[in-house]
Every structure is written in structure tokens, then in C-alpha cells.
Image: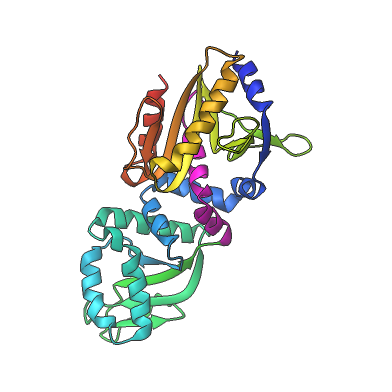
Amino acid sequence: MREELVETIKSIQLKIDTSKAALEFDKKVQSFIELLNNYPEAWDVIFHWKEHPKPLVIVEPTHFDFVKLKSEILNIVSGSHYLREFAYSFFEQYEEFEHENEKIKKINEFLKKSRDENIFEPKSEYMLYCSQCGKTVLVNRLDEKDKCNCGTSYDFKFSLASVPNKIVEGIISGHLLELYALRVVKMIEGLRLIGMEIGDEKEKSVYTSIEYAGIGVGDKANGELDLLGLKNDFLVAIECKFNETTYDDIKDFLGVSDNLFFKVRESHPNVKMCKVIFSYNGSKLRSTNAFLATSLKNISSTNQLVKEIRDILH
């Protein structure tokens, strides 16, 4: 039954989004997703970054008290345009959650690892801060032996890193969230993802953003699903929304997934349907018998997401 069901679904697959498929196979993007798997807190800074994209600020050492450091630096840099621009970028990066110090530390670790693993692109600009005398300077070349004029080492080093174009593309389009969801569902034991084979020798499969025939809503004949899987008798349809999700945002998905379910059930009457919404902020949604709503903004770990999905499939 399982293989027959998969073949039934594959028989109505139409096409993939080639630009999204390229991201799915990009090694740097995949490395970034793997880091996000370990640092889901970073979704907060990514979400706010997409509205004001610019180089991200990394602080070393990575453990610091954000509010205290901000207060110390704020008055010192006010007289210099260049120092002010650098420091304010750091302040703005965390302004939405500036009192959540543990989250800021984790995000800063994530940003540093992204740079150190050559995912982000380092820039040759640094701001150095000495807490002993309050001196703050900008340099284009970093020498670890450099010391402040007061004779002590600089306590903090602020550096910049740019987000590469492929990851920018994934953030702006929201496809990065689909790739993260793909990584999450791969962790669910017994869940088989349904992909679409590509290439002359069918050596690769794409799993995200596949269009299916005859399941569209409104005036559209066909419909697209972000991810689709099978566990036991459950078809698992997943929709990803990198926004503050409302019911209007998921209306089409609910219709498309229902249409797929009704279409498949004609030949496989025992199949059931499970719908999952992967949202950056799903606080306006309430999980029902029709779907499970997740909210990345509120999760403590990727394992928590895995457990939530796994529990509804028992």
C-alpha cells in the first residue's frame, strides 16, 4: 500500500521551482541550515535582518552582558559618525529582544561560527573597546598584540560579516525556512519524504516546493506544497511561512492539501492527512484537528519541533 500510495502521488507531480532547487543542493546553504539546527534562536535575528539587510556584527569574546555593554559604549561613540554607525548596527541587531541576554549570547555564537566556517563573508573593519579607560577605535587591520594607550588589552572586538547572495536569496524568498523544515522532518523516524526526481539519470530528488496537478484552489488548476511526507497511513503536508502568520496566509495551503487528500483517497481509502504549519511566528494560529501550528519564535530547540510533529503522528 505504501509504495502504491507514493507512486500515485508521484504520478501527479508536475514541476519544481528550479531556483529553489538550486538552494536545496547548495553546500554553503546546507551548512547554514545545519548551524540553524543547533541554534534555532538565530531565526529571530534573521527575521529582523530581512527587513533591514546589512552586515551583521559579531562580538568577541562571545559571552557578554548586552545591556551593560550597550550602556558603556553608547556615550563614548556619540561624538564620532563612524563609531556611531558601527555601534548602532550592533544595538539595532538586538533591539527587539535586548533584555534576553542568553538568547543574544547564543545568536552571537551562531554568527561567529557562520563566519569561522566560511559561510558568512568577513569584512576588514573592526571596532575595539577598552573598558578600563573607555577608549573605542576603528581599525582596518587587526593585530592581536595591539593594546590600548592605557597599556591594557582591548576587552571587546566587534567585527562585521556579510551574508552571501545564496543565503540572502533564501531568507528573502522564505525558502530557507522550507530547507530548515526539511532538515527537521528528516529527523522523524519512519517518516518518508516524497520528492521529485530530477536529472537524466534520476540521481537526485528535490523535496521542497513541488507542484501537483489538479489540486489547486480558486482559479488555479494546480497547487504547490512546500513539503510532503508519509508516515504509516498519514500523509504529512507542510507549509512554511516566514512571517507573523495569520489564517489568511494558510487558507490556500489548507485547500490544496485537502484537494490532494481527496484525490489520493479515491484509490487509497485508508489514508489520513496531517497538516503542519512551520511559521516564524505562529502565535495568531491555534492548533486544531485540522493542523498543527508551530512557532519558531517560541521553540527552545529543534528537538522540540521534532517531538511536536512526531506526537501527532502516533
Rendered-image quadrant of the N terminus: top right
> Can the viewer see residue 204?
no
Q: Residue at x 60, y 38 (%)?
A: 219
Nearest the eye: 257 or 23: 257
Q: Position of residue 204 (x, y in %)?
A: 68, 37
Image quadrant of residue 296? top left
Q: Hey, which quadrant is residue 157 in on the image?
A: bottom left
- Magenta stretch: includes residue 173: yes
User: Which stretch appears magenta?
Assistant: 165-191
Judged left or right of residue 144, residue 28 is right
Q: Quadrant of the C terminus?
A: top left
Q: How is the image coloured?
A: rainbow
Task: Please determine whether, in this image, residue 294 is positioned above or below residue 194.
Answer: below
- Nearest the eye: 147 or 270: 270
- x, y (%) of residue 153? 30, 77
Left or right of 162 in this view: 44:
left
- Point out residue 180 in the picture as x, y percentages from the top left corner: 48, 43
* Residue 279 appears in the rendering: yes
